[in-house]
Amino acid sequence: MPSYQQDIVAWSIDQARLIRTGRFGELDLKHIADEIEDVGKSEQRELASRMAVLIGYLLKWKYQPERRGASWDRTIKAQRKELAYALDESPSLRGKLAEGRWIDLVWTKGVVLAVTETGLDCFPEECVWSVTDEILNPLRLPD
């Protein structure tokens, strides 16, 4: 039986086999619990990453109107759809949308993306848009 430290993939396959065969006494419960917790953290990181990309593109859209195009529009739409899907699949993630510290983090990452891709340094340091009414709303683009 592979150990968690030696080969996590082989370990996870083995743990799944033990569960399916009802051999619960042989399970590595500590590491299983850690991995289950990590799944939730991974979903939160994915939400933050997608939100930062969306914010970055919304900032580019607002501050570089002369460069707007189909590519930016499609990226914004795709990120919004992915975020909507993630929030529908895991409704508990919606709580993140109201956490000031989380919003500050994703806003900062979005600004970094916009600065990196535009060379501009004129973006607000703090979130100036409502998450649900402006950032996630599929019918709105910043003027």
Image: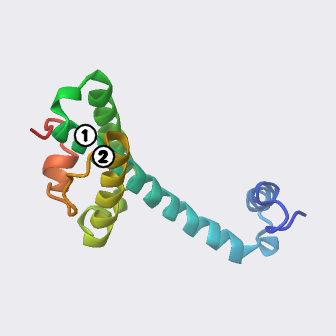
Quarter occupied by residue 100: bottom left
In the image, residue 99 lies at what x, y percent? Answer: 27, 70
Q: Residue at x 52, y 59 (%)?
A: 42
In the image, residue 3 lies at what x, y percent? Answer: 85, 67
Q: Secondary structure at mark 2?
A: helix
Q: Quadrant of the N terminus?
A: bottom right
Q: Residue at x 56, y 69 (%)?
A: 37
Q: Residue at x 23, y 28 (%)?
A: 67
Residue 109 visible, this orientation: yes
In the image, residue 2 lies at what x, y percent? Answer: 88, 63
Whether 111 is drawn above or below 63: the answer is below
Residue type at mark 1 is Lys
Q: Return the residue found at the far top.
A: 70
Quarter occupied by residue 19: bottom right
In the image, residue 123 lies at what x, y percent? Answer: 21, 53
Q: Quadrant of the C terminus?
A: top left
Decide which of 125, 73 is in the foreground and name it. Answer: 125
Q: What number is the disc on residue 56?
A: 2
* 18 left or right of 82 in image: right
Quarter occupied by residue 138: top left
* CB under 8 Å between discs 2 and 1: yes
How many residues crowd around disc 1 within 10 Å: few (fewer than 14), some, or many (20 or more)? many
Q: Return the residue found at the far left.
A: 143
Residue type at mark 2 is Gly
Q: Which residue is mark 1?
A: 60
Whether 64 is drawn above or below 4: the answer is above
